[in-house]
Image: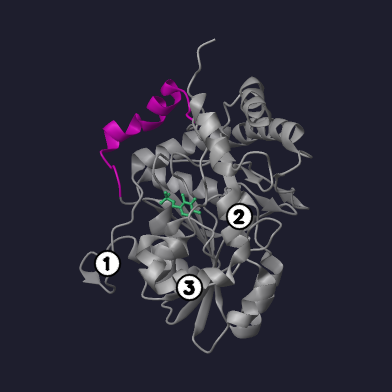
Amino acid sequence: MENKRINVTRSSMPSYEEYCEEIKELWESRWLSNAGAKHKEFEKQLQDYLDVPYLTLFANGHVGLEVAIDAFDLKGEVITTPYTHCSTTHSIVRNGLTPVFCDVNDRDFTIDADQIEKYITDKTCAIVATHVYGYICDVEKIEKIANKYNLKVIYDAAHAFGVTVNGKGIANYGDAAMFSCHATKVFHTIEGGITAFKDKEILDKTNTLINFGFVSHEEVDYVSTNARMNEFEAAMGICNLRHIDNEIAKRQKAAERFVERLSGVEGIRLIASQEGVRQNYSYFPVFFDGYKLNRDEVQARLAEENIFARKYFYPLTSELACYKEAYGASVKNTPVAKKASDCVLTLPMYADLTVEEVDKICDIILK
Ligand SMILES: *Cc1c(COP(=O)(O)O)cnc(C)c1O
């Protein structure tokens, strides 16, 4: 058998016919962006699916986070972690705020809620935390801390579309939560993002911030950007939303096979599922710590067989060239994040990944 290329991810797609049917009206209406019919319909469906009262659609996940932070008009320091996409850190820094890097916990690599308080000063204004690989942060403890010190809580939920806690949509936690709808994510709109908000006031402000700060045709109240989602993206979202539960179920099958094959192997660590949480199986991270091969060797072996796993998240954002000088020293405060980034490999994970392909990947790792 020829070695078919297996990438770390592969976009879910509706059928060609389904998408064409969905965009047909656009040739009639010629309304292609700026809150058109598809945009409005998609927003309604998402409020229902994500189980949240207020949300805004964006051109991509990053601007969904950056603009949401802007809407809160914050100043000072933001407690966050370096074990995330650079987007999280960029969205803080591009808002003129200072990231303060807290370590992650050793169970699921989300922010270590027990360490947050030691970083709080009179300059602290918010906590910006990531639901890593769709595993959720300790949302209850974070909420308690935020209430005690009057801080905003903004979640980078880019990985967490469709995740629920005790039946409640994950975006009900925090003052805002951003989902990325990039082509590589569990749920996508080609490019796109969704941010859910707790308060209507912040929602209304955000809806002006995504459109240059226009509050009416002739009035611009804020210095802002263009972060709008267009109708073709919304139409892709409407199609993909019809299939999301089925796509997640297919991912679950692949994930369960990985767990079956890799759990209990000495030197290989997986993240345990969280109680009461409906997972979305967005990634399949494996930590090679004391295994006969190190992470880089496993990655190279897989690549020889045309299988492409990724070191995600590596490096830590505090170690990136753009942040190293200012924040590199903070790495000593985040040993758990540092170690995770040195041993992690995310294996291929997507809805169409077959059990045979999972077996092939595991055979190579275990050989
Ligand atoms: C993908 C991702 C983003 C950025 O989302 P885009 O839609 O690509 O802009 C931000 N944070 C995390 C954790 C991500 O994985």
Which label's residue is closer to the chain start, 2 or 3?
A: 3
Local SS, label 3? helix
Instruction: Give the residue number, with chain letter if any, for mark 2.
Output: 340
Q: Does the magenta stretch include residue 82?
A: no
The extreme bottom residue here reads 122
Mark 2 or mark 1: whose residue is earlier in sequence: 1
Tell which of 213 and 88 is nearer to you.
88
| Closer to us: 227 or 254 | 254
For label 3, the residue is 329
Q: Position of residue 212 (x, y in %)?
A: 27, 64
Q: Nearer the viewer, mark 1 or mark 3?
A: 3
Residue 138 found in image quarter = bottom right
Q: How far apart are marks 1 and 3 (CA)?
A: 46 Å
- At a point 45% along the width and 69% down the height, the residue shown is 328
Q: In which quarter of the image is residue 341?
A: bottom right
Q: Where is residue 304 in the image (x, y as percent from the top left)?
A: 50, 26
The amino acid at mark 1 is Ser
- Range of residues picked out in magenta: 12-33
